[in-house]
Image (cartoon, rainbow, N blue to C red):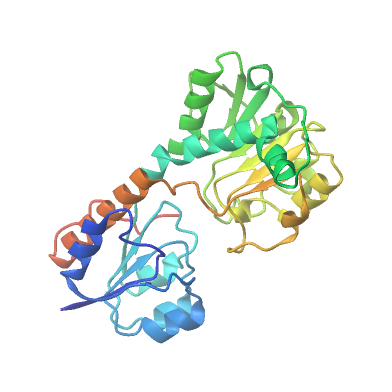
Amino acid sequence: MHNILISSVGFGEASPTSLSRIASLGNVSNNVEKIRFNDALFLEKIADQDVLILGTEKINKEILDRANKLRLIARIGVGLDNIDLKAAFQKGISICYTPDAPSLSVPEFTLSLILNLIKGISLSDRHMHQHTWHRPMGRMLSFMTIGIVGAGKIGSQVINLVHNLAPTTKILFYDTFSEHPYAEKRELAELFKSSDIVSLHLPLNKQTTNLINQGLLQQMRPGSFLINTSRGGIVDESALYFLLKSRYLGGAAVDVFAAEPYKGKLCELENCLLTSHLGSMSQEVRALMEEQITEDIVRFLNNQPLLRPVPKTYK
């Protein structure tokens, strides 16, 4: 029998059959308390586990050194910056993930944040709940220029959605490799200077950590908007706070943070729309991710090749 630790919160709620399949594979320790695993909790529980089902919780070298039996980390999601990949691969641990599933949900969520932000929907809602009749002046997407930073699976879908909703919107994008028929390619600094809205869709790595710093943000047009549904560490949160508080930027919508759960200074600002890492949290996509992870775990424990492995050359 295999020992399987589930640290991800809510595994099996979207796809109960996935949890049943996992339970049939061995001894399962599920996160029924729905708590955020920290280093201490991992160090307490990881030693005898064969498989770890992981969300956005961080796995460092110290935890992996304690994981004497661990053979597979199954990451529900697309980002891998929360795992010390080098240490994992050095120990011979395999890793699988769900790189395609969030591309069905995050673009739609991103578009909802863009529209919410430029229309002042949440701002008006907060005032209404305080019995204040507040009518913020909104903007029309079709008269704006939007810049997409990162035109991979998710960023390219955001371009498609914006184009389909408002075909007259000018769309710019920055990406090292991609091309897109509905958008014009720009260098990063030029994109920030030319856009009314900038939406981020990059992985977090050494090159992108704090890439969006104060110097780059100050190149944006006064009153413009920033959207981040990718990874928190890409944006210098202190710089973003300063430029929002000074009202140089018109607003921001932030779904991801350098440290989660987030309780930082952006919470003070009325012009910053904050959500709790909801980009892929749709019933359909969450179920798909759970099903894909379960399929790969079953294959792995039956000595079959993983369908969605993370290659050891991943950077």
Residue found at the far top of this picture = 168
Residue 152 visible to the viewer: no
Locate residue 116, reporting x and y percent: 63, 35
Q: Relative to residue 176, is residue 9 depicted above or below?
A: below
Q: Relative to residue 296, is residue 203 depicted above or below?
A: above
Locate residue 73, reporting x and y percent: 33, 66
186 left or right of 78? right
143 left or right of 162? right
Q: What's the residue at 60%, 13% (across, down)?
A: 168
Using the image as rendered, state which of residue 130 and residue 110 is in the foreground. Answer: 130
101 left or right of 226? left
Locate residue 89, reporting x and y percent: 36, 68
Residue 64 visible to the viewer: yes
Q: Quadrant of residue 100?
A: top left
Q: What's the residue at 44%, 84% (across, down)?
A: 43
Residue found at the far front of this picture = 131
Q: What's the residue at 43%, 37% (across, down)?
A: 153
Q: Relative to residue 236, is residue 4 depicted above or below?
A: below
Locate residue 93, reporting x and y percent: 31, 70
